[in-house]
Amino acid sequence: SAVISQKPSRDICQRGTSLTIQCQVDSQVTMMFWYRQQPGQSLTLIATANQGSEATYESGFVIDKFPISRPNLTFSTLTVSNMSPEDSSIYLCSVEGMNEQFFGPGTRLTVL
Amino acid sequence: AQRVTQPEKLLSVFKGAPVELKCNYSYSGSPELFWYVQYSRQRLQLLLRHISRESIKGFTADLNKGETSFHLKKPFAQEEDSAMYYCALSGPRGSTLGRLYFGRGTQLTVWP
């Protein structure tokens, strides 16, 4: 199995600012996924990040709002830019391995 | 379009009673179906997948392609089963699973 850590675990931010979330995996993985879980809602995929290529964004998500970096096979960052209260969510990093996806503990973001 | 429907947001049963968490899906093809579980203060983790046809912690789930359902069942619920359960699907397995589509989740509470 893959062990995933995320930083920060939670944050409270002012609108208009940006927050970068880090995801670290204990093994090399090809595909990393970023999900969002808004209050009372299901998990929604933001983008898929493969090392060495641009991230692939899902409908409704754009690179200017959610820039992603994937500098190597064990690390990725997701930035939530120009935040508004609607961005208040849990953001989850996920990786694939051994016929399943493993999830990080999540980053709980509150935007005031 | 891909869709996973969990009609019950909340489900409560007494200890020892049978429990069934419903999941219906729509997918133009042969998807892979999963149940993920999130216990209080823990990260999301895989409970079982249809392709394995396994029983985990007493839970089973049968894929019914005719009814496009993948309901999760346990004959005798335990208090430690209280958690949030998510049904999810991915496309047919190739070299990778790819992204997951999640239902909104069902919060199961098992009363003593």
Image (spheres, coloured by chain):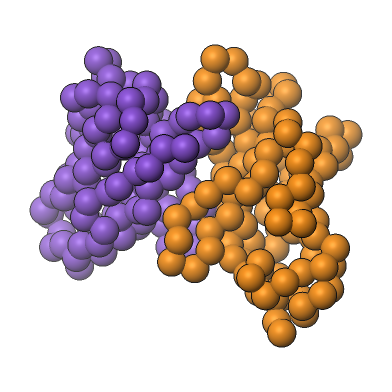
Chain colours: A purple, B orange
- Where the C terminus of chain A falls, by quadrant? bottom left
Q: Is residue B77 above or below residue B60?
A: below
Left or right: A71 in relation to B107 = left
- Relative image position of residue B27 (x, y in whole percent): 69, 30
- Relative image position of residue A48 (x, y in whole percent): 37, 28
Residue that lies at the very extreme toward the bottom in this rendered image = B112
- Please indicate, yes or no, whether residue B9 appears anywhere in the rendered image: no
Left or right: A9 in relation to B18 = left
- Please indicate, yes or no, whether residue A31 appears anywhere in the rendered image: yes
- Relative image position of residue A105 (x, y in whole percent): 37, 53
Left or right: A73 in relation to B6 = left
Location of residue B64 (image quadrant): top right
Location of residue A70 (image quadrant): top left
Q: Nearer the viewer, residue B20 or A84?
A: B20
Q: Residue at x 22, y 37 (%)?
A: A77
- Relative image position of residue B108 (x, y in whole percent): 66, 68
